[in-house]
Amino acid sequence: MKKIIFLFISLFFLGGCGHYNEINKLAFIDGIGIEKQDDTYHLYLAVVKEEKQETETTKKHTIYHVTGQSLEEAFQKGEMLHNKRAYYHHLTLMLLHSSLLENNQYQKLFPFLKDKLQQGDYLLLETPSPLSSILKQYQDPTDLKEFIRREQKESGTTTLLTFDDINAHDYDPEYSASIPSVILEDNTLKTNGMFLLGKDLTYNHSFSKISYLLSNQITEYYQTISLDQQSYFIHLLHLNCHISWKENTFSITITGSLESDELPKEKEKEAKKKIEEILEEEIKTFVQKEQKENVSTTPLKNILYLKLGKKQNLDEIYQTSKLDLKLSLSFQGGQS
C-alpha cells in the first residue's frame, strides 16, 4: 500500500491531474488465486482500493472471478475490471491450487506466470482446498501473509517463500523444490506442510519443519514436552544449522537456545534432554526418508554434488551416506 501511495504522489507532482486520471483507471491487484476444475481455469483477482474516512484511510479488497478454457484466456478476460485495467506491479501473494501443479504442470505454468507478470517477488502458496472458500475469509493478501508469518514463528511448519525463491532452485541440480501448503478444515485455515514439485506429494508438519530447519529457513519454533505428567511449552530460538560431508558421512550440527516461562529451573536439564531426543528422532527419520526416496528438499544432496561433482554414482553415495548429528541447545542464562 505504501508503494501505491508513493506512486500516486509521484505522478501527481510530476504530471498533475492528467496522471491522476491515468492512475484512477488502474485496478491495483495485490493477490491472485488460480485453480483448474476439469478443463476450466479459474482466476481470482484481489483488487485493493483506498477508502477515506473521517479520521483514517483504510483498504478495501474486492475479489473478481474470471474463467477461461486456458490460463491465457482467463488473464485476458481479467485485463479490464469494471472499466479499469489490471495492474500487477504491486502483487504480494499468489495462491495456487494443487491441481495446477500435479503431473509436472508447473513446468509450463511457472514460465507463463514469469512472462505474464514480469516479476516474482510475491509470496507463493499451494492448497488442495477450494480457493473460493479460502478467499471468502482472506480477501486481503496481507492477512494470509500474517498467518504464514505467525505459523513460521510458532510451529516452524511453514515459511515465507516467493516465486523467485522457488524458481532459483532451477540452478540447483540436486534440489527438490517445494511450496508451502495451506488447507481449510472445518472452516479454519491451517498449515498443510509443503508440496514437493515434480513428486506430487505433500510432506507432513514434522517433515516440513525439519526440512526448513536444515535449510536455515526457520530460526525458531515452539515445542510441547511432558515431564512428570506435566506439559511445558518450550521456545527453541536462534536456531542455526551447519552441514558438511566427508568420508561417506553427513555431519549436521544444530545450535540454538531454549526458554520457557513456565518451566522450573531445576527441570531445565531434563527438558533439554527431552527436546534433543525429540529433535534427533525427527531429523534422523526425515533424512532416512529423503535418502530412501532419493529426494532432497534440503542442501544435503547439493552439498554432496558440490563436493564430488556429477559422478555417476552420486545418487548411491547420497542414499548410503551415514549421519553424524550434533545438537547444541541450552537454556538462556544457564549452562544446561
Image (cartoon, rainbow, N blue to C red):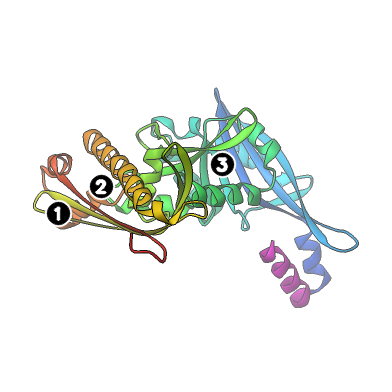
Q: Secondary structure at mark 3?
A: strand
The residue under the point 62% across, 41% down is 75
Q: Residue furthest right?
A: 54
* Residue labelled with disc 2: 174
Of residues 153 and 63, the one nearer the viewer is: 153
Q: Quadrant of the N terminus?
A: bottom right
The residue under the point 48% across, 54% down is 260
Q: Please indicate, yes or no, whether residue 116 appears anywhere in the rendered image.
A: no
Q: Residues within 10 Å of mark 3 (few under 14, many from 20)?
A: many
* Quadrant in the rendering for residue 51: bottom right
Residue 194 locus on image (x, y percent): 43, 40
Of residues 166 and 292, the one nearer the viewer is: 292
Stretch in magenta: 1-15
Residue 138 locus on image (x, y percent): 67, 42
* Residue labelled with disc 3: 95
- Residue 53, placed above or below residue 66: below
